[in-house]
Amino acid sequence: MAAPSWDARAQFDALQERKRNEESVLALSGSLLAVVSAVLLAELLWVNEDSNTFLVVGVLNLAMLLGWAALARRVGLAARRWAGKARGLEKEVLRIPSLYSLWEESGQVAPQAWITAGVAVVSLAVFWIGLLGYVVWVTYLAP
């Protein structure tokens, strides 16, 4: 097979870098968002007794969490696409032996950082939904 007319190694490195950047940005932003949400919850529970303020801030926080989760899903799919392209370059064009391959068929042992941050954010969103439902029930629906 003849060498491609483009620099396959540079393309492989660019795909790897793009995937790494997307995952690290998602992991960092998700972790920060989870911390801010938890601090906001603690502040609302300990300081504020007004249920209307709690509902407004809670709904805004929930919207922010769910928006991040939707964005994380989209970016995660893009990162997987870049990884697939890099895997194809590694195996078909660069022909790197599987012993030295970055992309093993068995997959990774530990979950990726952005998935772990995503689980934390989605868990917080589910918690906020339950908490907001409880506040609405106690404030407006309970007899």
Image: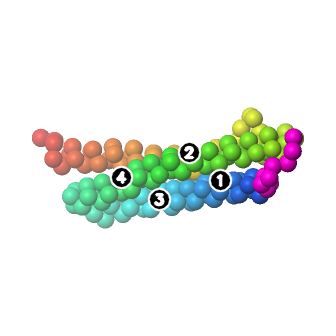
* Dot 4 crowding, Cα within 10 Å, few <14, some 14–19, many 20+: many
Residue drawn at x 87%, y 40% as measured from the top left: 1
| 83 sits to left or right of 114 | right
Between marks 2 and 3 in the image, the one whose residue lies nearer the viewer: 2
| Rendering coords of residue 117 (x, y %) | 54, 51
- Find out whether the residues at labels 3 and 1 contact each other: C-beta distance under 8 Å: no
Residue denoted by label 2:
77
Instruction: Tell me, yes or no, if residue 116 can be seen here.
Output: no
Contact, CB < 8 Å: mark 2 with mark 1? no
The residue depicted at 54 percent of the width and 51 percent of the height is 75
Q: Residues within 10 Å of mark 3 (few under 14, many from 20)?
A: many
Residue where numbered disc 4 is placed: 62
Q: Is residue 5 magenta?
A: yes
Q: Amino acid at mark 4?
A: Leu
Q: Give the foreground label among 3 and 1.
A: 1
Q: State which tag comes first along the sequence, 2 or 4.
A: 4
